[in-house]
Image (spheres, grey):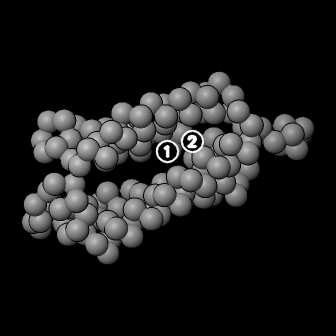
Amino acid sequence: MNKTILNFYLLFYGIGAFVSVFFYFFLTEGTIKFFSGEVSNTSLFWVKTVGSGDLLISFICLKGYFGNSEMKKLAVQSNFLYGLFHFGSFWFADKYLSPHKKYMSVQYIPSLIWITFTFIWWGILFPPENKDEKNKIE
C-alpha cells in the first residue's frame, strides 16, 4: 500500500473522530440514547470521556497526515491502540450489555479487523519512510 492510501486512512480517521467529538460533546444525551443507554450523571461523564479520546485521536491522525513518516507511524499505532479499546468496548456493550442498532453493531468487528490489519501493515511490516529522512546524517 502506498503513501496515498495511508494519507487517506489518516485523514479519514482524523475527520471521522473529530465529527464524533461533536456528537459526544454537544449532543451527549442523544448519543447515549442512540447507543441504547440511559441518561445519567455517570453516562454523561463517560460519553464525554470517550469524546476526549476521539479528540486526541483526531489530532494525532491529522498530525500524521500532515507530518513526517515517524508521525504517520505513531498515528497508525495510536489509532490501533485506541480503536482496539474503543471498538472493543462498543462490541462488548452490544454483545453482552444492551444491543445497539443493527446498522451500528455490524461495523464493530470489521473495524477491529481493519485497524489490526493497518497496524500490522504500516505499524510493523511496512512503516512509512521518507527518502529524505532515510538519508539524513544523525
Q: In the structure shown, which secondary structural element does the residue marked by tag 2 occupy?
A: helix
Query: Is residue 134 placed above or below 36 in the rendered structure?
Result: above
Q: In the structure shown, which secondary structural element does the residue marked by tag 1 occupy?
A: helix
Amino acid tagged 1 = Asn
Q: Nearer the viewer, residue 53 or 10?
A: 10
**From this viewpoint, is residue 96 visible?**
yes
Image coordinates of residue 102 in percent, x first then y, are 26, 44
Which residue is denoted by mark 1 in the rendering? Answer: 79
Distance between mark 2 and mark 1 Cα atoms: 5 Å
- Identify the residue at the far bottom of this view: 26
Which residue is denoted by mark 2 in the rendering? Answer: 76
Query: Is residue 100 placed above or below 39 in the rendered structure?
Result: above
Task: Give the residue displayed 10% in from the left and 60% down from the top.
Answer: 38
Image coordinates of residue 77 in percent, x first then y, are 54, 39
Asked if the residues shown at circle 2 and circle 1 are in contact, with their CB atoms under 8 angstroms apart, the answer is yes
Amino acid tagged 2 = Val
